[in-house]
Each structure stands twice: as C-alpha cells, then as structure tokens.
Image (cartoon, grey):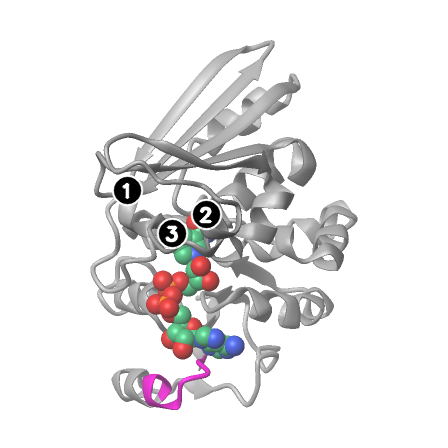
Amino acid sequence: MKKLAIIGLGFIGETVIDAIISQKIDFEIQAIYDINEKVLKKVQRHLKNVRIMKNLTDFSDCDVVIECAVQSVVEEIFDKVLEDNIYFIPMSIGAFVTNESLYLKYQNLDEEKKKLILLPSGAIGGFDSIDAIALEGLNSVLLETRKPYHVFEKSAYAIKNGIKLDKNKETIIFEGNAKEAAKEFPRSINVAARLSLATLGREKTRVRILSDPLINQNIHRVFIESNVGLYEFTFKNKPSPSNPKTSWLAALSLISFLKKIQ
Ligand SMILES: NC(=O)c1ccc[n+]([C@@H]2O[C@H](COP(=O)([O-])OP(=O)(O)OC[C@H]3O[C@@H](n4cnc5c(N)ncnc54)[C@H](O)[C@@H]3O)[C@@H](O)[C@H]2O)c1
C-alpha cells in the first residue's frame, strides 16, 4: 500500500483523510503537517501510527506527497520531492504560474522527472479531451470566470483600476493572460494555472474575470479553438461545505485522482 504525506489539513486535506478512513481509497497515511498546531493535534488524535513531520520536507519515507496548504509550500518542497524521486500532487497549482523560477523549473524538467508531478484537474475538468485536442495544436484558449457581485464589491483591483460594478448586469473586471491574472488575483489562480499548463502556457492562455449579479456561485467557462473543433466547457461549482473559497469539486478531483494511482 502506498504511503502518503499530507501537508495542509484544511478542507481538502481532511477530505482525503476521510476518504482513506472510510476506505473509499486505499492508502496508508504515513505523515501529516499543518502550520496550525491545533489542527495538527486534532487530526492526529483520529489517526493511529501517523507521524507528525518535523518540517515541510520530512517526507523521504513516503511514496506520495500531497500539498493542500498554500502556494509557498509548493515552492518550498519542490526540489526535495524531485531529489527523493517520489510522486508530488500539488493542489495550490497557482504556484507554477505566480512563481517565475518554479514555472521555469517545471517547464524544463526532463520527461522522467515531470512524470512525478501529478496535477489533479481541480475545480474544472475535461482534461482528457483538452490533452487530446492539444495533440493537433491549439489556436486559442480562454478561461472565463464569473463570480457573484459581492465578491468584487470591495475588490482592491476594481478600486485601483476605477472599475464601476453594475448591480444589475455583468461587469468585466479583468482581461489579460494567465501570467497577468496570477499577479492580480494570486489567490484564485489555480484554475487558470491548471488550464495554462495543459494548453498554451502562461502568456498565451487568456483569462477574463467578470462580476455577475445574477449568479450566486462561481462559474468557469473554458473556450478552445483548434483545428480539431471548437469547444466550450462549463463548470458551475458549489463551494465546499467548510471552506467557501474552495470548490467542492476540487477536493473530489483529488480523491478520484488518488483512486487511479493507489
Ligand atoms: N487546484 C484547484 O483547482 C484548487 C481548488 C481549490 C483550492 N485549491 C488550493 O488548495 C489549497 C488548500 O485548499 P483548502 O480549501 O483545503 O484550504 P484550507 O484553508 O481549508 O486549508 C489549508 C490548510 O493549510 C494550512 N497551512 C497554511 N499555510 C501553511 C503552511 N505554510 N504550511 C503548512 N500548512 C499550512 C492551514 O493551517 C490549513 O489548515 C489552497 O492553496 C487552495 O487555493 C486548489
């Protein structure tokens, strides 16, 4: 049975632990870590024989490391994971777009090492088709993300750029590429990052963000133009039960991904 290290024990980390305890997936939880001592102790009480990691890179005895904490953790452990030759599943995928050196390191990995970095689909999907379409080349890729009006009501970006939100209809908040989106919206870049890594990269993958007073959930739309055809994927995600900032689907994508490699 494969041994897991789980870094970050919030909504996604707990969902993985619950899936293992309830035997939806078959892994041994070898080591856990969270910056919050209280959370760490609480989770440890539910797990027999689990080791609390001494630091973020104390995972050499594991087969798979899951990061579900924050982007900075991805940066901190990336080299050690490759050095140890173990699988790494980062959930804070935005790190690969916001951090220049990490982006270049990832892009320049040799094929064997790249196979160690496993990227779950997260809050969107369709990557089986997207990967297939990409084999024939992609002409354009656009991610359109709509969020409820209240999300942008006090947005620093909207205020800084003099964007007047309309209470009755949609307002475009941002248009640019994934790299620029990452700079302006670092906390909500995971979807754009996952899409850009699978398609045209940070500079050529376009991102549009809208405020939409007629919705009460985040909606992601992916538009792809290619010689193979025209594609539109829509994802209307519900937030997770315990963390409104995280789509429920993101945690489930990790569980179904783990099922495939167990
Ligand atoms: N790939 C995707 O599509 C996708 C979708 C949703 C969320 N995410 C990302 O996944 C990550 C986890 O999401 P979540 O909903 O479980 O978050 P959460 O806030 O519920 O839990 C995060 C946990 O990480 C811990 N943590 C914070 N900083 C840490 C550090 N430096 N070292 C160790 N632990 C640390 C926190 O104490 C917390 O317990 C976030 O970065 C989020 O942006 C990715």
**In the shown orientation, is residue 58 left or right of residue 37?**
right
Quadrant containing ligand 1 reads bottom left
Query: Taking 183 as reference, is 199 above or below it?
Result: above
Instruction: Kindly identify the residue that appears in the image at 49 percent across and 65 percent down.
Output: 66
Query: Taking 174 as reference, is 249 above or below it?
Result: below
Q: Indicate the secondary structure of the residue bearing disc 2.
A: helix
Q: Which mark is residue 158?
A: 2
Quarter of the image for residue 235 reads top left
How crowded pointer 1 is (Cα within 10 Å; few <14, some 14-19, many 20+) is rated as some
**In the shown orientation, is residue 126 left or right of residue 80?**
left
Q: Which mark is residue 162?
A: none
Q: Earlier in the sequence, mark 1 or mark 3?
A: 1
Q: Which residue is mark 3?
A: 259
Q: Which residues are magenta?
A: 33-40
Image coords of residue 84 (percent x, y): 69, 70
Q: Which residue is mark 1?
A: 237
Q: Indicate the secondary structure of the residue bearing disc 3.
A: helix
Q: Residue 39 colored magenta?
A: yes
Amino acid beneath label 2: Ala
